[in-house]
Image (cartoon, rainbow, N blue to C red):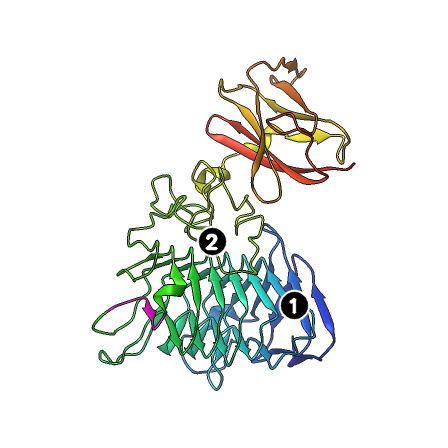
Amino acid sequence: MIDDVIIENGVTIYIIAGVQVEFQGYYSIDVKGTILAVGEPENQIHFTSEFPAAFMIDHSEYAAWNGIKFNNVSTLNSTSKLEYCIFEYSKSFEEKGGAIQIYNASNLEITNCIFQNNVSDFGGAISFEYHSAPKLFGNLFENNYAFISGSPLYCSYSYPRIINNTIVSNFVLNEETFHETAAIHTFISKTQMTNNIIWNNETNFYDPHQLMYCKPFYTTYNDIEFGYNGTGNIEQDPQFTGTGMYLFALDTDSPCIDSGTFSLLSGFEFPEFDIAGYLRFYNDYIDMGAYEWNGMSVKNYELPITNFKLSNYPNPFNPSTTISFETTNLHENSRIEIYNLKGQKVKNISLSLCHPEFIEGRGGRKYSVIWNGTDELGQSVSSGIYFYKLKAGNFQETTKMMLLK
């Protein structure tokens, strides 16, 4: 981008998966209408600077862009959606919110995005001001900076819903040890904080804490370093994997596994997938943080599980479909699990009685099972999208299919 962009009231723009929005100067996007930037887990939309190598943690405009601004957006406009996006190397100082500023705007959902290397005086990544009530779900906030307070988030006179985010290693640079600061700074707000991991965010305040003025009634089922009052909150090392593509995924012994809650204030629907693209629910439970533990550490997903060649035919189907995969060694407890869009398991199919077909020239075998569109009780399920997960030893793979009636 070579200039500021204004999305006028009543106008909707679309940004498709895989696009890189590169700012060649200190420019911004001012949203008066609607923006739909919907990426994919492995095909994200990238908002970044033209010169990231020259970006500095200071008040200069060089090598930075000036964020996306939602100011006084009409409630008559459609909801803006930012999904599977990366926001980095943005700064804002005259206004709060390094990457995204939200002022008197509520029709906004930010889901499964990554915020990193953004800078502001207040709200290094995002600010919410003056009766704003957007929804933030499943995002990762890491390595954002605030010169005064609120290294990732600043909120005043607003009511955002901040659900299932991982907020780690952000920094408040305020050197005044007696100036009360925190990673998440709220002021006269009712910020709903639920199922989040808030850990290892640093300030110089002599009495370190992660949250400032968050109301305990609205702060529930979070893992918060230094602790915090509120139902279901814990203070335990989240035990991230620390390796591979997903550094902040949960390791096998994490206390955040199955420690979240589905009980939220009305009007909220959980997305089907987490930030890595895996089912948001596992065995009818939900974890804290942006990454859902699906029976194994996400770092193991980087193993070559795609060798299974998992597929089903026909797809879409009615009334039945054949699920097939290939392998050289079928684990004795291998199974197919089928889930609906809510993440609820509807069918478990053991593979112990499968009869393999030898694959000529490849040394493997092809296995197949038939699902007739029924649940564990033999009742027919409704039309819609379903996910089938192959579990074989330490490996698993998930694919989707559609039942049409």
- Magenta-span inclusion, residue 210: yes
Depth check, mark 1 against mark 2: the one in front is: 2
- The CA distance from mark 1 to mark 2 is 23 Å
Question: Does residue 123 appear anywhere in the picture?
Answer: no
- Magenta-span inclusion, residue 6: no
Q: Secondary structure at mark 2?
A: loop
Q: Kindly identify which residue carries mark 2.
A: 263
Instruction: Please report the residue visible at 64 percent of the width from the left and 81 percent of the height from the top.
Output: 4
- Which residue is nearer to you in this view: 157 or 42? 157
Quarter of the picture holding the C terminus: top right
Place of residue 17 in the rendered image (x, y in percent of width and height, measured from the top left): 66, 57
Q: Secondary structure at mark 1?
A: loop
Which residue, as the protein is rendered here, is positioned at the far bottom? 94
Q: Which residues are magenta?
A: 208-214
What amino acid is at disc 1?
Thr
Q: Main secondary structure of the magenta part?
A: loop
> Nearer the N terminus, badge 1 or badge 2?
1
Quarter of the picture holding the N terminus: bottom right
Vertical arrangement, residue 245 with respect to residue 60, above or below: above
- Which residue is nearer to you in this view: 345 or 207? 345
Characterize the local packing of mark 2: few (<14), some (14-19) or many (20 or more) Cα atoms within 10 angstroms. Answer: few
Q: Kindly identify which residue carries mark 1.
A: 79
Vertical arrangement, residue 96 with respect to residue 201, above or below: below
Instruction: Please report the residue visible at 39 percent of the width from the left and 47 percent of the height from the top.
Output: 259
What amino acid is at disc 2?
Ser
Marking on residue 290: none
Q: How many discs appear? A: 2
